[in-house]
Image (spheres, rainbow, N blue to C red):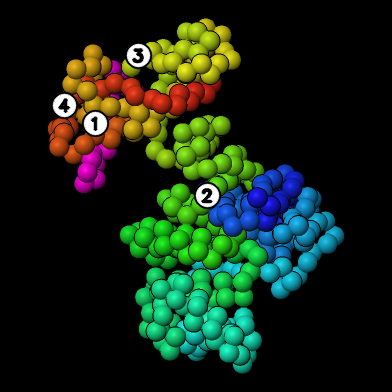
């Protein structure tokens, strides 16, 4: 599939403050990509560079095969065929929904433009709302209008800047899934910027985890969760803790919860080398018959399951998802065992 977005060795600085450092990624046409990371990692600056709001100091940005940014050359935003949905939606309060959606189609909509407006409202589930004004709509409906307005001119690339941050958690999760369906129906290449991994996982085909101006890892949500390449990605994506282990063979580790086999993947470390093994809540299974026990230090009820914080004999605390019919008391000891499909280990943060 042809690349729609190609970013190569991108660098950008505000004065002496370099906020983007040799950043690379490629996104195929029709795919949804995401730049995910904590505040201050540079992700919004990358979005502004893509939109043409900021010049770049090094590297290139190409959209649909056209180089639109390189040092000394900046194609204006209006020539890039880009749509953008802002954090605050930026709807025009004095225009009704139909006029908001048609804003980029000309001041006096032609019959084809009116058809396009109707098609966009149908796409986002707002047919019949064209005469309403933004203040008469819910936050979720306003978000849909902003999306319809951005899609109406048929952009080559859509940019979403923290689009759900003003919504409550339940609406945010539901709308993330609905927006993905809308974008896939439209076939629009999209880049989302967010600090919320639930949003990123619900929307994106591929995600770049950003840290200090760089992409630490670019991959599918599944790969980032189960096969993180760096300790930062392992720590940032999903819930997890690190358990101390020791290398006992080319593909084996020993931990206080038993031996682990990497499935043949070499550890590239000598026997006796200390490592930290990543454990997700679904890697620790409740098992009354297990010889390993842990004390329930805290628990959070989640409906179908409990998220238990368990204290091991060493004092290390780990997390475990347990079906909610196993309602154990704080201080109670329960049997547990490891059930890890993907063994992920990093050099120990500190060696005792």
Q: Is residue 188 a member of the stretch shown in magenta?
A: no
Which element carries disc 1, helix, strand or loop? strand
Q: Position of residue 224 (x, y in %)?
A: 51, 38
- Is mark 4 in CB contact (under 8 Å) with mark 3? no
Q: How many marks?
A: 4
Residue nearest the viewer, comparing 107 with 110: 110
Separation of marks 4 and 3 at Cα, in angstroms: 21 Å
Residue appearing at x 78%, y 50% in the figure = 59
Q: Is residue 324 left or right of residue 5?
A: left
Separation of marks 1 and 4 at Cα, in angstroms: 8 Å
Residue 33 in the image: above or below residue 167: above
Separation of marks 4 and 2 at Cα, in angstroms: 42 Å
Q: Is residue 327 left or right of residue 165?
A: left
Identify the disc placed on residue 332: 4
Choose the circle earlier in sequence order: 2 or 3: 2
Residue density around tag 3, few if under 14, some if 14–19, many if 20 or more, within 10 Å: few
Residue nearest the viewer, comparing 183 with 327: 183
Separation of marks 1 and 3 at Cα, in angstroms: 21 Å
Q: Is residue 8 left or right of residue 83?
A: right
**Residue that carries the numbered disc 3 in the rendered image:** 258
Q: Is residue 76 visible?
A: yes
Residue appearing at x 50%, y 89% in the figure = 94
Choose the circle earlier in sequence order: 1 or 3: 3
Residue 209 in the image: above or below residue 298: below
**Residue that carries the numbered disc 2 in the rendered image:** 205
Residue appearing at x 59%, y 85% in the figure = 112
Start-end of magenta stretch: 300-318
Which element carries disc 4, helix, strand or loop? loop
């Amino acid at each position: 599939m042809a690349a729609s977005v190609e970013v190569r060795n991108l660098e950008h600085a505000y004065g002496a403050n370099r906020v983007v450092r040799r950043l690379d990624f490629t996104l195929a046409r029709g795919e949804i990509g995401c730049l995910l990371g904590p505040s201050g990692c540079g992700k919004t600056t990358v979005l502004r560079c893509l939109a043409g709001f900021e010049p770049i100091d090094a590297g290139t940005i190409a959209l649909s095969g056209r180089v639109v940014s390189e040092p000394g050359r900046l194609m204006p935003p209006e020539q890039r065929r880009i749509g953008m949905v802002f954090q605050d939606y930026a709807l025009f309060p004095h225009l009704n929904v139909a006029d908001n959606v048609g804003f980029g189609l000309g001041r006096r909509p032609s019959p084809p433009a009116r058809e396009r407006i109707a098609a966009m409202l149908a796409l986002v589930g707002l047919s019949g709302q064209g005469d309403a004004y933004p203040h008469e709509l819910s936050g979720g409906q306003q978000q849909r209008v902003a999306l319809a307005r951005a899609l109406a001119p048929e952009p080559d690339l859509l940019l979403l800047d923290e689009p759900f941050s003003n919504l409550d958690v339940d609406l945010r999760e539901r709308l993330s899934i609905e927006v993905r369906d809308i974008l896939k129906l439209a076939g629009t290449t999209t880049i989302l910027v967010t600090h919320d991994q639930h949003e990123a996982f619900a929307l994106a085909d591929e995600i770049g985890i950003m840290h200090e101006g760089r992409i630490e890892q670019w991959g599918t949500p599944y790969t980032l969760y189960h096969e993180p390449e760096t300790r930062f990605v392992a720590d940032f994506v999903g819930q997890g803790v690190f358990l101390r282990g020791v290398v006992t063979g080319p593909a084996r580790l020993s931990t206080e919860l038993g031996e682990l086999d990497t499935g043949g993947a070499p550890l590239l470390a000598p026997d006796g080398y200390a490592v930290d093994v990543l454990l997700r809540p679904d890697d620790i299974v409740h098992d009354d018959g297990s010889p390993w026990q842990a004390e329930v230090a805290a628990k959070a009820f989640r409906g179908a399951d409990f998220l238990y914080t368990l204290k091991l004999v060493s004092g290390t605390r780990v997390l475990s998802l347990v079906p909610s019919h196993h309602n154990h008391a704080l201080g109670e000891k329960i049997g547990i065992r490891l059930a890890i499909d993907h063994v992920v280990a990093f050099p120990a943060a500190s060696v005792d």
